[in-house]
């Protein structure tokens, strides 16, 4: 570095040093996630792994999508199958990201070599997604300022939990929690509402709840079709998602139950707009003990 400083003009050396410093603050990262399909299935798949990966990457990331099939069927069929599976995952990702994810490549590679186990063949019926993004190096962050003395702390902290009327024990309506149509996964913008529910469960340690899932639109069947699992229990799976989210965040399962109520209790009827439908795609929290 001393040699460079001696050889380069001061302005150029400073510019080079700044560029090196900025590169040290950022690091290229890749997360791989997979979606798995049943035999001959082209559209419906298990997207749990994709959602976990997607929730952990920053905005303006990119993705490379590669589809596969197992060795059943001929070569042309398997290439077509793998291409359709890859496109189904692309549609899923674009709907999930609302245009904030850049799909840079989509490819169907056809069949993978046969294995000696059924499990291996099942693992071949998949689409791999490589999420690429730039992560800032948090190790270079400056030291945080000293906390203010008690006399300067705002007496009214920011509200992070739902307030519960301990007398009426009315249901907690999660107004900021909504779900992707036909799926049991919440929209990305809904995640703060889920963390708010975690804070509520921690704030009231004796609180016990029933998580009630709801759907919109179809009033002719007991429940809706879950496009992620292929089961006609969409509202139940939405409630189960919230149940499992709370459990993963340290809430005891003994304090919670969940149930799917289908479209039996709409908040808006008839539904005239997409906003009306989104209002009915919801989860409410019934207080069973406090």
Image (tube, rainbow, N blue to C red):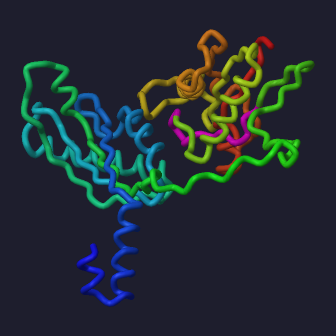
**Horizontal and vertical percent position of residue 102:** 38, 60
The residue depicted at 61 percent of the width and 19 percent of the height is 251
Which quadrant: the C terminus? top right
- The residue closer to the viewer here, 9 or 180, is 9
Is 243 situated above or below 87?
above
Q: Which residues are magenta?
A: 173-184
Rendered location of residue 130, percent (x, y) = 30, 48
- Number of labels in the image equals 0
Quick check: 266 left or right of 237?
Answer: right
Q: Judge whether residue 183 is colored magenta.
A: yes
Res. 221 in view: no
Rendered residue at 36%/35% (across/down): 44
Where is 160 relative to 246, above or below? Answer: below
Q: Is residue 286 above or below residue 224?
A: above
Looking at the picture, tell me which residue is in the foreground, 255 or 78. 255
Specify whether residue 44 is painted magenta.
no
Q: Quadrant of residue 114?
A: top left
Residue drawn at x 48%, y 52% is: 97
Q: Residue furthest bottom?
A: 9
């Amino acid at each position: 570095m001393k040699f460079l400083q001696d050889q380069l003009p001061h302005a150029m050396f400073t510019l080079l040093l700044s560029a090196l410093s900025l590169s040290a603050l950022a690091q290229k990262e890749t997360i791989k996630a997979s979606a798995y399909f049943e035999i001959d299935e082209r559209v419906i798949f298990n997207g749990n792994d994709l959602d976990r990966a997607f929730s952990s990457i920053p905005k303006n990331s990119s993705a490379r999508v590669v589809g596969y099939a197992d060795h059943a069927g001929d070569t042309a069929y398997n290439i077509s199958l793998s291409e359709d599976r890859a496109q189904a995952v692309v549609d899923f990702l674009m709907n999930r990201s609302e245009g904030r994810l850049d799909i840079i490549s989509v490819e169907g590679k056809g069949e993978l070599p046969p294995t000696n186990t059924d499990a291996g063949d099942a693992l071949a019926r998949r689409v791999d997604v490589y999420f690429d993004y730039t992560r800032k190096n948090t190790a270079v962050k400056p030291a945080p300022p000293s906390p203010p003395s008690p006399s300067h702390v705002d007496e009214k902290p920011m509200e992070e939990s739902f307030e519960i009327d301990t007398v009426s024990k009315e249901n907690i309506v999660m107004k900021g929690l909504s779900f992707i149509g036909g799926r049991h996964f919440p929209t990305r913008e809904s995640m703060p509402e889920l963390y708010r529910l975690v804070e509520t469960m921690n704030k009231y340690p004796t609180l016990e709840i029933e998580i009630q899932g709801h759907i919109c639109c179809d009033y002719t069947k007991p429940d809706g079709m879950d496009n992620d699992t292929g089961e006609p229990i969409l509202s139940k799976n939405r409630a189960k998602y919230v149940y499992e989210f709370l459990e993963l965040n340290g809430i005891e399962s003994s304090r919670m139950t969940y149930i799917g109520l289908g479209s039996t209790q709409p908040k808006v009827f008839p539904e005239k707009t997409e906003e009306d439908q989104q209002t009915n795609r919801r989860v409410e929290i019934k207080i069973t003990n406090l």
